[in-house]
Image (cartoon, grey):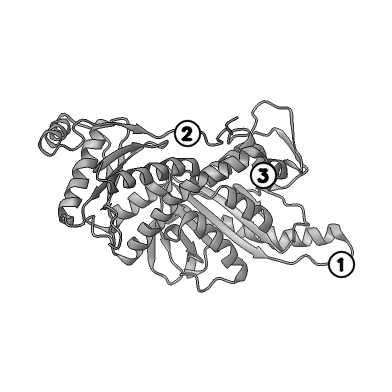
Amino acid sequence: MNQLLNESERIVYDICKKSFLSLWCYANPVGKASKELCDILVVCDPDVIIISVKDIRITNSGDISTDWKRWRKRAIDASVKQIYGADKWIEEASHVIRNDGSVAIELPEKKVRRVHRIAVALGDEGKAPIKFGDFGKGFVHVFDKISLEIIMGELDTIEDFIEYLSAKESLYLSGRKTIYQGGEEDLLALYLREGRQFPEKFDLLIIDDNLWEGFKNSEQHRAKKEADQTSYTWDRLIEVLSNDILRGNLEFGPNLTDSELAVRTMARENRFGRRLLGQSLMEFYELARQKKVRSRMVLGNSNVTYVFLAMPHDEDRQYRIAELAGRCFVARGLNQDRKTVVGLAAERYEEGKGFSFDLMYLYKKAWTEEDQKQMKYAQAEFRYFSNPIFQKTHGDEYPQKEE
């Protein structure tokens, strides 16, 4: 629910939903004594993102130094205080509490939980210098509207976004001297240009104010954006499945949690991984439409095995579910270094006919001799990947233009 959001909070919430999906974004969740915990909470195991939003206009007293100081106190310091309070409550909490008082998703276990703190300071119109860092109780990222839109537009998956937050925090905590002449977007350009990391060996790092413009307009960046169009096939699939989960339309799984785990696993893929998976998915369904293939295993860049299954419209759906489960089990045995399998089944495409999805999530930490026997039986009896042809997705994140 987000009916309690004011205009500035809604701006940030909509940006988050676009990147993180409504399934894991909570607006105005409740904390201690049923009071608002923070403006937006994002939970995607093992990560928790606490976001506080303040929309404060800069006054014009004639003394710019005093105006900036007052603005930072109301726009940044107030957010930091709320974030630290939320962090303290989350430390002892087990579940998210929605703004209507209902219990939502379980918080990640403490031993693996990673908390990221973000203050969004609006209203400065890009004029005030932004201060970020450790304000006494943990590192806080501070974005204005311009930097937030650029960063979350460029890092528009939760995996890409969190990797950047973690790298930036590590750079700050390293204690090495860094001078910021540009904005957050220029720091982002350096991070992307260096292969999604910051330089490690330096005495003094100066972040210039033209890095982002140069990177954004480069041929390298344009080629990536063009190649990334395929990745949004994966995004659209995730959104369809998320909506089905929210409406309770998915028929597979003993409970909702299994479906959520499958979609969350799919959503943990970064933009480059989604590009490769989207391409594989489209190729598979085209071959399935031509009746050249029934199922396929895909090994993406993450440590997950994906199983795609497409069957004729007239085949029984319960049989399709059973076959998907069997194929996921065999896929787990054939890729013993990958403990997680996500399966997706649908009808072959036929013009004028609808479609439905079945979703499977399988996590199996250990593979036993009995499992191996069952796998061999399924291969021999049902021909599930009996003679597997493995497809390992690959490519360049920044494709080189052919001469």
The residue beneath circle 2 is 395
Q: Is mark 1 on a helix, strand or loop?
A: loop
The residue beneath circle 3 is 216
Q: Nearer the viewer, mark 1 or mark 2?
A: 2
- Which dot marks residue 61? 1
How crowded is the residue under tag 2: few (<14 C-alpha within 10 Å), some, or many (20+)? few
Query: Residue 238 sits in which quadrant?
Result: bottom left
Q: Quadrant of the N terminus?
A: bottom left
Identify the residue at image location x=10%, y=37%. 381
Q: Where is residue 228 in the image (x, y as percent from the top left)?
A: 51, 45
How crowded is the residue under tag 1: few (<14 C-alpha within 10 Å), some, or many (20+)? few
Nearer to me, 296 or 3? 296
- Which dot marks residue 141? none
Nearer to me, 334 or 224? 224
Instruction: Pick whichever of labels 1 and 2 is earlier in the sequence.
Output: 1
Residue 380 as seen in the image, left or right of residue 24? left
Q: What residue type is labelled 3?
A: Lys
Q: What residue type is labelled 1?
A: Ser
Residue 105 position (above or below residue 266): below
Q: In this view, which residue lies farthest toward the bottom?
A: 3
Instruction: Pick whichever of labels 1 and 3 is earlier in the sequence.
Output: 1
Instruction: Pick whichever of labels 2 and 3 is earlier in the sequence.
Output: 3
Q: Where is residue 171 in the image (x, y as percent from the top left)?
A: 64, 36
Q: Quadrant of the C terminus?
A: top right
Residue 338 as seen in the image, left or right of residue 168? left
